[in-house]
């Protein structure tokens, strides 16, 4: 049975005569810009309606990605993307109904999301930047593996995964400065080989760069109103290099474990091999824990950030505590 929302969006793309990919990206850009506008307008009724539009469109954009994560069996991202649409609509309704409360933490959240989404999808949508991040990530992993004596590797030529097949970036005829056509699951990717040219079973894509994690901290810190840029820059100088270094170790660990234990399975007959286990489960749990520790470390420097997070999460924690109290 097809998802009615997906069918509706695909039908809209057909009616407008645009690729589904382009329509999805337009949801992202319009939603992020609407949130950015509402953040800078503050607590006016117009800002609340702009925020409601932004939350709903971004929720729809992320919801449309859930089918891909179902196909690759990534349960965490399935949960996060599938829940984005109802959460976005609910938050939008709350914004409109309660605009006069002038909730400073909710205004911060608008800016944090807007200034996370806009830079990330700017990199994604500009092929030359996308490829540079992919190449940097692959070379950093290669350097660490060789430095630790875990093998001799080389990074292959950047490739482009298109719906029609895979081609080398040097032969790709698309624009280097704005993405105008849909890509395959890998997008721009860097093959990883042994030094003799034998392929390794792992390749690098933009998602391997930890750009998403870095941008979350960029948005959260930049959106702090009333905080000096000196403190903001200090926070960014703590967060971004730390995330990059941890991610290089993460990638190196995934490559080494996947290569060394290529025949490993979670249990006999399981489809979950070492790459799936480390990439989709162990590394994600470790990354979330590392981001939690990093955020905790930043709270001393930026207590405003801590205050906003506590206020935003209060409805969720209250509901959780109320549920536990009833069940006990």
Image: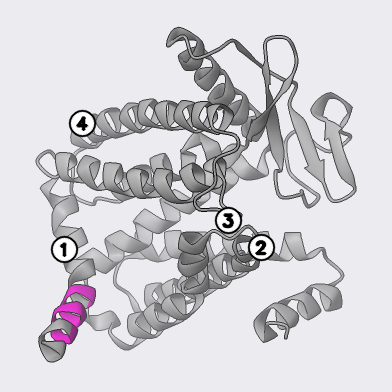
CA distance separating discs 4 and 3: 51 Å
Residue 256 image offset from top left, x and y in percent: 51, 26
Image point 35% across, 54% down: which residue?
A: 112
Question: Are the two marked residues, 4 and 1, in contact with CB atoms closer than 8 angstroms?
Answer: no
Badge 4 or badge 1: first in the primary sequence? 4
Return the residue nearer the eye: 1 or 89. Answer: 1
Q: Which residue is mark 2?
A: 71
Question: Who's the residue at 18% across and 40% down the image?
Answer: 298
For numbered disc 2, what is the local secondary structure? helix
Quarter of the picture holding the N terminus: bottom right
Measuring from the top left, give residue 64's x and y in whole percent: 63, 69
Tell me which residue sits at (76%, 48%) in the image: 183
x%, y% of residue 214? 40, 39
Q: In the image as oriented, which residue stretches furthest toward the bottom?
A: 326
13 or 62: which is nearer to us?
62
| Mark earlier in primary sequence (3, 1) | 3
Decide which of tag 4 and tag 2 comes sooner along the chain.
2
Q: Which mark is residue 270?
A: 3
As drawn, is 225 to the left or to the right of 86?
left
Q: Which residues are magenta?
A: 316-323
Looking at the image, residue 178 sits to the left or right of residue 324; the answer is right
**Numbered circle sitting on residue 291:** none
The residue indicated by pointer 1 is 310
320 magenta-colored: yes
Q: Quadrant of residue 194?
A: top right
Cα separation between marks 3 and 1: 40 Å
Q: Position of residue 4 (x, y in %)?
A: 68, 86
| Residue in the foreground of this view, choosing between 143 and 130 | 143
Q: Nearer the viewer, mark 2 or mark 3?
A: 3
Q: Looking at the image, is mark 4 or mark 2 nearer the viewer?
A: 2
Residue receiving disc 4: 230
């Amino acid at each position: 049975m097809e998802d009615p929302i997906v069918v509706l969006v695909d039908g809209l793309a057909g009616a407008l005569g645009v690729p589904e990919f382009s329509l999805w990206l337009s949801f992202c850009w319009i939603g992020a810009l609407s949130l950015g506008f509402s953040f800078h307008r503050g607590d006016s009724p117009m800002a609340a309606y702009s925020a409601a539009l932004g939350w709903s469109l971004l929720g729809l954009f992320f919801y449309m990605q859930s089918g891909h994560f179902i196909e690759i069996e990534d349960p965490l991202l399935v949960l996060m993307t599938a829940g984005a649409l109802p959460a976005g609509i609910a938050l939008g309704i709350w914004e409109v109904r309660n605009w006069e409360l002038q909730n400073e933490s909710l205004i911060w959240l608008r800016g944090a999301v807007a200034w996370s989404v806009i830079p990330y999808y700017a990199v994604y949508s500009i092929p030359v930047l996308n490829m540079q991040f992919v190449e940097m990530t692959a070379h950093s992993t290669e350097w660490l593996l060789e430095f630790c004596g875990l093998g001799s590797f080389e990074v292959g030529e950047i490739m482009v995964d298109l719906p029609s097949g895979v081609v080398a970036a040097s032969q790709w005829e698309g624009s280097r400065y704005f993405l105008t056509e849909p890509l395959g699951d890998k997008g721009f990717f860097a093959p990883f080989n042994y030094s003799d040219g034998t392929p390794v079973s792992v390749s690098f894509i933009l998602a391997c760069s930890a750009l998403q994690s870095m941008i979350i901290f960029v948005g959260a810190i930049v959106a702090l109103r009333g905080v000096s840029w000196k403190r903001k820059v200090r926070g960014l100088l703590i967060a971004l290099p730390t995330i990059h270094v941890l991610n290089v170790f993460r990638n190196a660990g995934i490559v080494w474990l996947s290569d060394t234990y290529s025949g490993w399975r979670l249990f006999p007959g399981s489809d979950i091999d070492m790459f799936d286990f480390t990439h989709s489960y162990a590394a994600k749990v470790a990354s979330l824990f590392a981001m939690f520790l990093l955020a905790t470390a930043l709270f001393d420097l930026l207590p405003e950030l801590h205050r906003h997070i506590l206020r935003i999460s209060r409805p969720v924690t209250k509901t959780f505590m109320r549920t536990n109290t009833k069940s006990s």
